Amino acid sequence: MELKKKLLLFLASLAGVVLILVTNETKVLISKDPQASPKLSRIIEPATLRATEHGPIVGSNDKNDTHVWFGIPYARPPIGKLRWREPQTVQAWSKEFEALYRQPGCLHSRTFIDLKSGKKQVFAGAEDCLYIDIWAPRSAAENAAQTEEQLPVVIWLNGGGDKIGASSYVSGYGFAGSQQVVFVSVNYRLAHLGFFYHRATRNTAETSGERSGNYGLLDIIYALNWVQNNIANFGGDSKNITVIGAADAGSHASALIASPFAEGSFQKAIIQGGSMKSLSKSEAEHFHDDDVPGARSSSNEVILDLLLLRKVAADRDEARSDINTMSDESLRAFLEGQSAESIIGVDDDHRGETGELHSLVPLPIRDGFVIPEMSLYELFSDPISYNNVPMIIGSNLDGVKSVMLFEPDYVAWILNRVPIIKDRDFFKMMSKLQSDLKFILGVQEPVKLLTRSRRDVQALPNIFVYRFDWSNIQSNLFGNWSQLLRASTSLELDFVLDNFHQREGLSIWSSETNDSERYALSMSIMDYWGSFVYTGNPSRGRSGTLEEWVPWQDRSKNTLLLDNPLKGQIRMEELRYEIESFKNRVISLLSEVKTTRKCKVAAETLQKSTASSALVPDYSKWISYPSLCLDNQQ
């Protein structure tokens, strides 16, 4: 009945959609791709003239009493022979560089859901992409290095699982203006252009950094160095820098915490979305069916697919043989001869039978140089072995729903436009279990470890934990978003940035009915984040009026729940998951699943989610194996 109702509503609105299609002579998208939007005319603001180590730049005025400088190059374009190389110093300029428009993000794939049958892959961005955007309050001093008016600096790393994302998908004027900080959004190489660990690139590397395969992480570190050398002229304090990793970019923030290359380049970190994942060298390089298996989209699997795509090899066995016998130089020459789009596109070919990505490759790689080879669990057990800075770490109540939305085991799409939950009870159960598991492995267990390591050396606790619970989003003709998404991963980003715009691929869910509570929650979150950026302690916010947020401690009110402040729902609560009780709950719920197939889908999904946590060495104790489903009725 629900399916029929949605279909009728969709067809009823189709005429209006087609009219928009004809009028605008473009595909119908529920929301716009920010990089595809036409450039708005901007006027140079003389007061924005700034000196950088590479030459003078000038920007423009933006909203919320800020100045903005778009598309500042911080390194040379990583194209041609610079693909899979360390970032190189940008060529200096003498004339004023007009930083008026956003530059392309780093190349990534986009799957727009449109009116055609199936999903169409398109690419956004370019290989020439190493740019930053800067927002600063208009009152910021032109040369803060010579005054006492230096403002804290925020480095924003966009999420997207290293497969999508760009600095242009956020606007920093809201946070910069309201909290009086300098806000820097960074582009860095994505997917296998950013993270590629293979002998062909490793053994032909020109520097030790290049051998690591962590090119995207090296980009971020290079951008941090640029900020340290130049940000004073934008009003920023180079000794008070906070890195924010949004959604899956939390893995980059944790990699920076682990990396000796990043030592001293930032003073605080915020990990939003509960992601601290990384890959071992074997996971990053080996074939997935090796004795020591690699990930489904490891570097060897990428090369194999490219050999098949170019018809260099006839089948998998021949391609494997070619890879094993070709020299490093020959393999590198072959890879450099491939288009960037073909390399990025291979990532989307590694899908399982249900359509989900087998692995969140690419991820930061524990190569032993840029990131220590030991597990992050070992590393974070010793507070002098990592960049021990104050941290905010958290995730969302319904964190995995934004991923489940595109997994066909749970959701069907009518004409690729309207999502319908196939089995509401199954969807609800799996979203709850997976979201809880994400909090356990991405927040609770790492925070336990980090807090314990500081306590062992009698250091004061400096880790603050939150969970984002607000879920009052509005449904419409295109989806029952209040059930499909609720408080899913990345929903909090708009609140952090006061940036409630339409989101890529999904309809807008704000409305007049929730405007007041959205605004109040956004102001509270920015208040907390602002206090942390200034002092390393969110406390009661910069205003001093909020619920006190205290550092995490076991067996106490240790987690700040972020919900509707108009109903007093921002509060400290004790969140703690025990192994046995969680596992018993999984077993009990799996026993109630109606079919063996769904039970196996559930168990295997939880197993993969658990095994992908590199931070928890004894993760197997959280796993429920698919064998639990054998006794279920067909």
Image: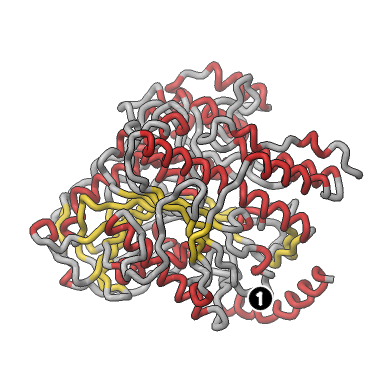
Q: Is residue 140 left or right of residue 437?
A: left
Q: Is residue 134 visible?
A: yes
Q: Residue at x 40, y 45 (%)?
A: 253
Q: Nearer the viewer, residue 478 or 484?
A: 484
Residue 403 vs 297, above or below: the answer is: below
Q: Residue at x 28, y 38 (%)?
A: 263
Q: Residue at x 70, y 67 (%)?
A: 418
Of all residues shown, which one is farthest toward the left?
146
Q: Is residue 235 left or right of residue 188?
A: left
Q: Name which quarter of the figure residue 252 lies in.
A: top left
Of all residues shown, which one is farthest toward the right?
634
Q: Is residue 587 left or right of residue 65?
A: right
**x, y (%) of residue 368?**
40, 26
Q: Nearer the viewer, residue 553 or 67?
A: 553
**x, y (%) of residue 554?**
49, 46
Q: Secondary structure at mark 1?
A: loop
Q: Is residue 245 visible?
A: no
Q: Nearer the viewer, residue 412 or 257?
A: 257
Q: Residues within 10 Å of mark 1 (few under 14, many from 20)?
A: few
- Tell me the quarter of the image containing the C terminus: top right
Residue 262 vs 271, above or below: the answer is: above
Q: Nearer the viewer, residue 236 or 168?
A: 236
- Tell me the quarter of the image containing the N terminus: bottom right
Q: Name which quarter of the figure residue 35 lies in.
A: bottom left
Of all residues shown, which one is farthest toward the front?
555
How many dots with numbers? Answer: 1
**x, y (%) of residue 169?**
44, 61
| Residue type of the residue flagged with mark 1 | Asn
Question: Label 1 belongs to which residue?
Answer: 476
Residue 309 vs 67, above or below: the answer is: above
